[in-house]
Image (tube, rainbow, N blue to C red):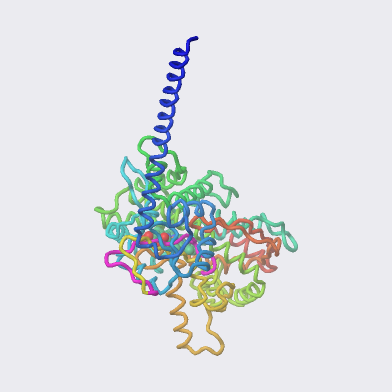
């Protein structure tokens, strides 16, 4: 080969090399461009954010994936608490989100007019109906629309309104007593250990279904999640808390118009509700007219407000009862039994109060159970220690902004969140024993004057977020309290309880509702109760 030829070959291969290199560089540039742009975008957002002054975890200030991860783990309440211990009352946990531990702001941020709107976190639980987004009373974030759909049914949730549903709760409670007696009481002494956590779910779901359309779902009788709805509900809540931290992702997963990826839908319960609604409208859904249910009330609301209440709306009212009223009540009942039995002196005192009361009948009428001050104190302490909603209750700062107690100014459009689990442990509000389970804090002290007690209660009530506050306060609070109070009074009157393993701790997965598992109990029928249980069985 000549020198010339060699030279040309080298020249050729070097120009190929150059072309190859520049193509590689171009490819790297193409690949890097989005990353660099994203970093630039994040950088500009970060450095220009008015929330930059607030402390918090580094990643939280950059991306919502930080909160999303902890929501997914079910430990958000513990993470928030730890961050507040580290950083103080205001923690920036998201690019546009401040988690605050100031109960003095509850009145402002949870206003009764609804100026402080819920964030899109809640809207993730909206559903697609005929290609349109449909929001229920919980998920509707627009204040005016929320007020419009709430108005026709609000009165049925008042204390007097829910009193008419008590016979339904009695019927399901009587079944709970019978099922517990048959399955878990021994002839003499305590029976086998059982999973109280699951049974409270069965009970609460059956009870809220019964108050809503006069029929249980059937979990108590069957003794398991026979139609899969309880598992579906857990998955739907897991989805809501996780994707709710990054609501744009909801358009990809749930509201995707091309292909819906998830979460699972409440098919079985929706069909059950729809069946009752259609049946009732045709006069085929038999129920005792002397025992009205929510569905009767919603149909009455339709008569009075036909422009607001159509068939879809009635179904939505019914389903929100189940979604918002079942797990919350189950969680509250688990808390009462677990925390009370973990503190034997509390159990002894409550047992004494209940056994000394002479109830006119069993199940204990709510009007009688609510007269027991220690029972009320124990329930409130349980709501405080493990609130039924352990995720932050979020609102957008409206026009005019918000001045925090430290004097700093938070601009309009910022999301602020109040986690009841954190606020209920604030030592400045609840005292140095805020971390302790101490029902006595809800009672008048021996040396405390009436005035001082009233003032202290006022302070505690103002700081209590167990049922939310303002225009979006829990609509079912009166029913939830009725169920918890009479269930505890009835069960303790009829049975003695103990923890299967006094040293074992429960586990909690926070998915809005703090789902407790591992609450294993044993029970024993009280000596004088055999006859009463037989009578209950015959009556209900
Ligand atoms: C002890 C049991 C209960 C607890 C601890 C509880 C707790 C709560 C909390 C904290 C909220 C506010 C959530 C937020 O703002 O993000 C709420 C809202 C709500 N709850 Fe309950 N709840 C209970 C029982 C019930 C029951 C039995 C029903 C219905 C039958 C119900 C229906 C609702 C509804 C409809 C809302 C939305 C209210 C609105 O946005 O206007 N709850 N609940």
Residue drawn at 67 percent across, 72 percent down: 344
Q: Which residues are magenta?
A: 384-406
User: Residue 336 in the image: x percent, y percent?
Assistant: 58, 66
Pick the quarter of the image with the C terminus. Answer: bottom right
Q: Which residue is farthest right?
A: 188
Ligand 1 resides in the quarter of the picture at: bottom left
Which residue is farthest left?
307
- Residue 255 visible in this rendered orientation of the protein: yes
Q: In this rendered view, identify the residue nearer to me: 133 or 148.
A: 133
Q: Which of 366 and 459 lies nearest the eye of the viewer?
A: 459
Q: Residue furthest front?
A: 3
For the point 45% across and 61% down, the residue is 392
- Residue 392, magenta (yes or no): yes
Q: Residue furthest top?
A: 1
Q: Is residue 498 above or below residue 243?
A: below
Residue 220: image location, x then y, percent:
57, 52
Instruction: In this rendered view, identify the residue nearer to me: 348 or 46.
Output: 46
**61 on left or right of 344:** left
Residue 71, x across and y down, in percent = 50, 54
Q: Nearer the viewer, residue 223 or 341?
A: 341
**Main SS class of the magenta portion in the image:** loop
Left or right relative to 116: residue 186: right
Can you say whether 457 is above or below 178 in the image? below
């Amino acid at each position: 080969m000549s020198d010339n030829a060699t030279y040309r070959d080298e020249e050729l291969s070097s120009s190929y090399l150059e072309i190859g290199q520049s193509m590689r560089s171009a490819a790297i540039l193409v690949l890097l461009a989005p990353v660099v742009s994203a970093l630039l975008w994040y950088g500009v957002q970060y450095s220009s954010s008015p929330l930059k002054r607030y402390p918090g975890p580094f990643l939280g200030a950059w991306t919502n994936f930080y909160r999303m991860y902890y929501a997914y783990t079910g430990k958000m309440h513990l993470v928030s608490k730890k961050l507040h211990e580290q950083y103080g009352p205001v923690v920036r946990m998201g690019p546009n989100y401040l988690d605050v531990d100031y109960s003095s702001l509850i009145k402002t941020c949870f206003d009764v007019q609804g100026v402080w709107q819920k964030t899109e976190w809640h809207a993730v639980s909206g559903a697609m109906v005929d290609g349109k987004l449909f929001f229920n009373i919980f998920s509707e974030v627009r204040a005016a629309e929320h007020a419009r759909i709430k108005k026709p049914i609000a009165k049925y949730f008042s204390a007097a309104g829910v009193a008419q549903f008590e016979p339904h709760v009695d019927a399901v409670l009587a079944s709970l007593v019978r099922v517990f007696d048959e399955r878990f009481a021994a002839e003499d002494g305590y029976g086998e250990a059982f999973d109280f956590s699951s049974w409270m779910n069965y009970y609460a779901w059956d009870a809220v279904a019964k108050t809503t359309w006069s029929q249980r779902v059937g979990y108590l009788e069957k003794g398991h999640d026979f139609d899969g709805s309880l598992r579906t509900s857990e998955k739907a809540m897991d989805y809501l808390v996780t994707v709710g931290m990054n609501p744009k992702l909801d358009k990809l997963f749930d509201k995707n118009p091309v292909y819906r990826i998830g979460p699972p839908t409440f098919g079985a319960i929706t069909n059950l509700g729809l069946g009752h609604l259609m049946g009732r409208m045709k006069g085929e859904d038999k129920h005792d007219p002397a025992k009205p249910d929510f569905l009767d009330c919603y149909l009455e609301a339709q008569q009075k407000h036909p422009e607001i209440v159509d068939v879809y709306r009635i179904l939505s009212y019914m389903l929100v009862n189940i979604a918002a009223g079942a797990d919350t009540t189950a969680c509250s009942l688990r808390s009462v039994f677990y925390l009370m039995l973990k503190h034997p002196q509390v159990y002894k005192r409550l047992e004494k109060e209940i056994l000394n009361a002479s109830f006119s009948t069993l199940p204990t009428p709510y009007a009688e159970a609510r007269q027991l001050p220690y029972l009320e104190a124990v329930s409130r302490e349980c709501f405080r220690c493990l609130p039924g909603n352990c995720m932050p209750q979020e609102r957008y700062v409206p026009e005019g902004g918000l001045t925090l107690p430290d004097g700093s100014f938070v601009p309009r459009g910022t999301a602020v969140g109040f986690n009841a689990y954190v606020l209920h442990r604030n030592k400045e509000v609840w005292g140095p024993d805020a971390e302790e389970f101490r029902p006595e804090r809800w009672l008048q002290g021996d040396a405390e004057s009436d005035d001082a007690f009233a003032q202290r209660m006022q302070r505690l009530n103002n700081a209590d977020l167990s049922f939310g506050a303002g225009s979006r306060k829990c609509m079912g609070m009166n029913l939830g309290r009725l169920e918890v109070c009479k269930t505890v009074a009835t069960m303790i009157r009829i049975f003695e309880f103990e923890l299967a393993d006094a040293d074992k701790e429960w586990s909690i997965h926070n998915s809005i509702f703090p789902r407790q598992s591992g609450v294993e109990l044993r029970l024993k029928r009280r000596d004088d109760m055999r006859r009463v249980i037989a009578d209950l069985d015959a009556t209900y």
